[in-house]
Amino acid sequence: MDWYKHCAYDDVQKRCFHSTGKQRLRTLAKALNFTTDSFDIRSNTGGIAVSGEVTLHHEHLYVQLCQPATRADSGILIRTCNGRKDYVGGRNHFAALSMLEDIPALARVCNSVMQEGSRP
């Protein structure tokens, strides 16, 4: 998957970004040992000029994929949260979309964010 091929104005690429993104987030949830009832995976395709977002929302972790309009290599947003109704969460952390090709490494980053978020 080419995570950096622009989705804007390319419906085929956007569908691929969202379907592959959902699959990778499911794999991430499994790597993090999340039970299937402890998280949701959502997809918001947005308008024609954007990639939209794919989100994994767990009880304690929120991970969202997108192609930033700034073209910065920060397409994975990771932050802690307090339940699946918390859409604000803790401090934002960012990772490169290329980390979706190395789920164990991304899981380590997510675990680090969760550990940081659990400190007083």
Image: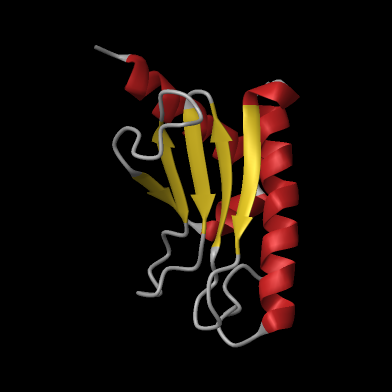
- Depth check: 106 or 49 in front? 49
**Residue 110 appears left or right of 3:** left
Q: How far from the left and from the top, in percent, is residue 31?
A: 69, 29
Quadrant in which the C terminus is drawn: top left
- The relative height of residue 68 versus residue 7 in the rendered view (above or below) is above
Badge count? 0
Q: Residue furthest bottom?
A: 9
Q: How far from the left and from the top, in percent, is residue 83?
A: 47, 24
Q: How far from the left and from the top, in percent, is residue 113?
A: 41, 30
Q: How far from the left and from the top, in percent, is residue 82?
A: 41, 23
Residue at the image point whose x is 49% and y is 30% from the top? 61
Residue at the image point whose x is 55% and y is 36% from the top? 57
Residue at the image point whose x is 48% and y is 56% from the top? 96
Q: Residue furthest left?
A: 120
Q: Quadrant of residue 74?
A: bottom left
Q: Is residue 34 visible?
A: no
- The relative height of residue 16 versus residue 12 in the rendered view (above or below) is above
Quadrant in which the N terminus is drawn: bottom right
Residue at the image point whose x is 59% and y is 41% from the top? 56
- Depth check: 110 or 17 in front? 17
- The relative height of residue 63 versus residue 48 in the rendered view (above or below) is above
The colour scheme applied to this rendered structure is secondary structure
Q: Residue furthest front?
A: 85
**Residue 70 appears left or right of 55:** left
- The relative height of residue 104 versus residue 38 in the rendered view (above or below) is below
Q: Quadrant of residue 34?
A: top right
